[in-house]
Amino acid sequence: MKKVISILIIAAVLGISFFIVDNVPSIGDGTAVIMHDDFILSFLGVLAGFAIAIITFLFANLDQIRKSILANPKLNEHTKANVRRSITYIYSELKLDTLCMVIFLPVCLLLIIVRDCPEITFKINNISKYQIISSIELSILLLTFIALLDIVISLFNLAKVSNQDFEEDD
């Protein structure tokens, strides 16, 4: 089910991006600052670096957080299993989001090269190469924001799990 939701989100972002590129002249013709190559590459690089810094800090502390929670004598085995599942899920979310953000950078670089190479031409249903690539670049920017938001939500969820007030076993 999660894969279906992810595919739907990506499809929606692509659709929104194509709509924006087609209907907002400054985005469609590349004059908007957010569509400049140097902005896109710098933006993605900074956010990927930010995500890697967060993940590095978190993973350095994740094992300690897990050990302190699971060593709590007030926790029953069911609660400990839930904590383990929650931490594992949060870890996988952070890993996937960071990986996506890092992969987006070379993908954008490749798109810029393809867009600027006059030998490569294509058109799909009267949509030019430039519009297709601009739509994909805008989608990558939007998906980067979504990944960053997911990282922040995962961090708050981890804080919630680690600060949970556990009841004593009866």
Image (tube, rainbow, N blue to C red):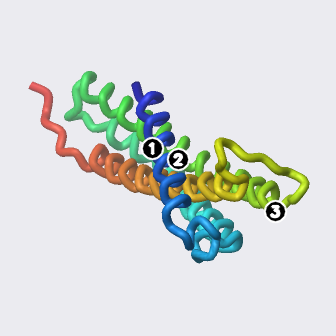
Q: Could you tell me how far apart the alpha carbons at marks 2 and 3 are, in whole angstroms? A: 21 Å
Quadrant housing residue 81 = top left
Residue position marked by numbered label 1 in the rendering: 12
Q: Is residue 67 something one can see in this rendering?
A: yes
Q: How crowded is mark 3: few (under 14 residues within 10 Å), some or many (20 or more)?
A: few
Query: Image quadrant for the C terminus?
Result: top left
Residue position marked by numbered label 2 in the rendering: 14
Asked if 73 appears above or below 34 in the picture, the reply is above
Camera-side residue of 122 and 151:
122
Residue 37: x %, y % from top left: 70, 69
Q: Residue at x 68, y 54 (%)?
A: 133
Q: What residue type is labelled 1?
A: Ala
Residue 66: x %, y % from top left: 40, 40
Q: Which amino acid does label 2 sit on?
A: Leu
First in sequence: mark 2 or mark 3?
A: 2
Q: Which residue is drawn at 61% across and 46% down?
A: 99
Q: How crowded is mark 1: few (under 14 residues within 10 Å), some or many (20 or more)?
A: few
Residue position marked by numbered label 3 in the rendering: 116
